Amino acid sequence: MKKAVVLAEKPSVARDIARVLRCERKGNGFLEGDQYIVTWALGHLVTLAEPEAYGETYQTWKLEDLPMLPKRLQLVVIKQTSKQFHAVKAQLQRKDVDRVIIATDAGREGELVARWILEKAHVTKPLKRLWISSVTDQAIKQGFAKLADAKKYEGLYHSAVARSEADWYVGINGTRALTTKFQAQLSCGRVQTPTLAMIAKREADIRSFKPVPYDQLMLTTTQGLTLQWHDQKTKEQRIFDRAKAEKLEQKLKNANGVITAVDTVKKKTPPPQLYDLTELQREANSRYGFSAKETLSILQRLYEQHKAVTYPRTDSRYLSSDLVGTLPERIKACDVQPFRKVVVSLKGRSFDQRLACINDKQVSDHHAIIPTEQAPAPAALSEKETKLYRLVVRRFLAALFPAMEYEQTTVSAEIAGEQLIAKGKRTLSPGWKEVYAEDGSRTEEDVDLPRLQKGEQLRLAKVELKHGETKPPARLTEATLLTAMEKPMAFLSKEEKELADTLGKTGGIGTVATRADIIEKLLQTQLMEKRGKELFLTGKGKQLLDLVPEDLQSPALTAEWELKLEKIAKGELSKSQFVEEMKQYAGSIVKSIKQSDKTFKHDNITGTPCPQCGKLLIELNTKHGKKRVCQDRQCGYKKNIAKVTNARCPKCKKKLELWGEGEGQTFVCSCGHREKLSAFQERRKENQHKKVSKKEVANYMKKQNKQDEFANNALAEALAKLKLDK
């Protein structure tokens, strides 16, 4: 009997699929059943070859050898995961296999993971595609019941290849050109450089900002009504002329007035839209300080491990109409604290396509992030997972409630020929606001106005002039940077905005799936830094932008490229045409850098000369610790001076760095703690008696799991202390 190979992206998802398909026999990198063989990648198993693969010329970094523009980019198996690649390849090439089912993540990158493996393994067997938005047993069964022809997703694959090849040509050529020209570790990219430029623009806007003082005129009547002056023509409530403000104050001080209008209108505030990945990353950063990368990582666990939420890498904030029938089961899964009261009020309600969150036209590959029909065990989630899960559940439940209804009253008055207004608000029906009532979120409170009628006379009790001044734009945080990457129009120059208008829609920078990685890379390469929640350019970042060609810094140009990638996915533009354009662009970048007469000054230079060439060494922070390298790349001297260890500081619990050599080795912490290696080892020996066996930990866990939610904090603290002591 012929079988089908199911190719998943990760082992955890493969195990779930194998369980549903009853593939129980274990093999080398696969699980087999009577009809299916389930195997898996480990993320990417195949990637684009490094420049060295295209000849000896590119094994050394030389400016004169650039640009590197191979006619066809080669694929290579990643060495670290080559064992799994060959395990997958062996299953794909079995004689009893007559078809392949792609079951990698349902998105652009997931398509690339699978197709590159199939191409490198020379597979020509018929292909089907499993396209699901959650990995619950029910979703997997439904997905296999309606497998799609893989040809439907070839455009998505071509788009992914085009993105990857474009990044190779632009990134590698630009990075090698910058590094060799200016003798410094400098990198640029199709997405990361314009993202960095937006940080620079915001800093420039803040530096050039000049606060302007203004006044606001507030009047209180004997009836308890507070009115605010506004300009009759412009409706501006701020007065930027102090003399005019004081003159108005004197004019109104002893005057009486009359109510000219009392207008009351009923209004509605619809529920907030559901989360896409970017919006959820923004919210998590604003509320909890989670980085974009951290939020995505937590979401992946909620999706893959706990099966509690749907596919996270989505750019849609709507649901498709075919999900309406699943809403009752999803609501039932949300029947846990603190949502039980809300869920009770939803039970028995019927839902249809008229819900504001249902819109087939706004859903392309995946719908918004919502809970699955499978409720996670509360004790199974970590504190951070719980926070994100609750955000998703609360937004989902709110979307099922009607709009908030309120009554807004505007009172207009005339005093001494000047126009003044007061506004009041009264809630008629809280609607979706009920869902957020116990969230701790601040909601707008009702503003009561005294009962008044048109023509009623007013007597003033108090006239107050409030002083203020305009504020500079706020520094970007990860939350607001994500917004800027999604909608970069505010960061375009006048000329770029005109270009965007001629192009029509302006796309975003990067995609929902890549933005977190871009931000993380800019931080890791010390091009920008985080102080609290705010993002700042480093000296290295400022210099890099001064050295990089201006058009590579343009958000408009990068957004235009993203729109072209979307067109490739839809079959409206050929991949080869786009890649050829990017190759030409890479050549222009190299030419611009070669002709530059600018210089780079290291801001991390030390006073220690290189023992090989005599030039001063520079100090680098890497993920493994600190090292000193010669600023001349041709010299190549480098030496590790401090390495990050797993030992923890007894004061602040951060990882310690180990400095020095031999008997002089010393642990150093950023908080100021210092400790000789020998003293640390003595302290470790003294604490050996506190060691806890695995059996004791397992028994403790069993007891704790029987208790209430989040009862594992004590164990976590005990284990953390034990780890420190070790």
Image (spheres, helix red, strand yellow):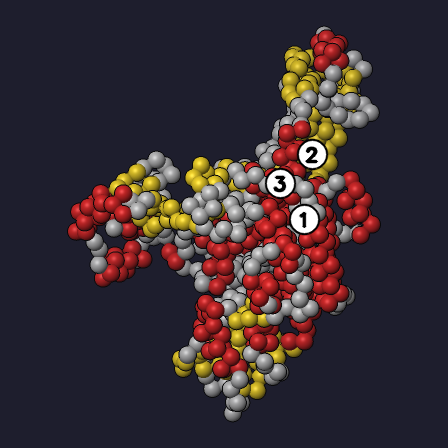
Q: Where is residue 38? Give x, y as percent.
A: 48, 78
Q: Nearer the viewer, residue 78 or 279?
A: 78
The residues tagged by marks 1 and 3 sit, at their Cα atoms, a distance apart of: 11 Å
Residue at 68 percent across and 36 percent down: it is 407
Residue that badge 3 annotates: 599
Residue 259's mark? Answer: none
Q: Nearer the viewer, residue 626 or 291?
A: 626
Q: Earlier in the sequence, mark 1 or mark 3?
A: 1
Q: Earlier in the sequence, mark 1 or mark 2?
A: 2
Residue that badge 2 annotates: 408
Q: Nearer the viewer, mark 3 or mark 2?
A: 3
Residue that badge 1 annotates: 593
Q: Nearer the viewer, residue 154 or 631?
A: 631
Discs 3, 2 touching: Cβ within 8 Å = no
The kind of residue on which mark 1 rests is Ile
The kind of residue on which mark 2 rests is Gln
Q: Secondary structure at mark 3?
A: loop
Q: Where is residue 305? Give x, y as percent.
A: 45, 63
Quadrant of residue 249 within the rendered picture: top right
Looking at the image, can residue 535 be seen? no
Q: Earlier in the sequence, mark 3 or mark 2?
A: 2
Q: Is residue 398 left or right of residue 698?
A: right
Q: Secondary structure at mark 1?
A: helix
Residue 662 to residue 26: above or below: above
Q: Where is residue 607? Give x, y as percent.
A: 44, 36
Looking at the image, can residue 305 be seen? yes
Residue at 56 percent across and 59 percent down: it is 60
Residue at 53 percent across and 67 percent down: it is 44
The residues tagged by marks 3 and 2 sit, at their Cα atoms, a distance apart of: 61 Å
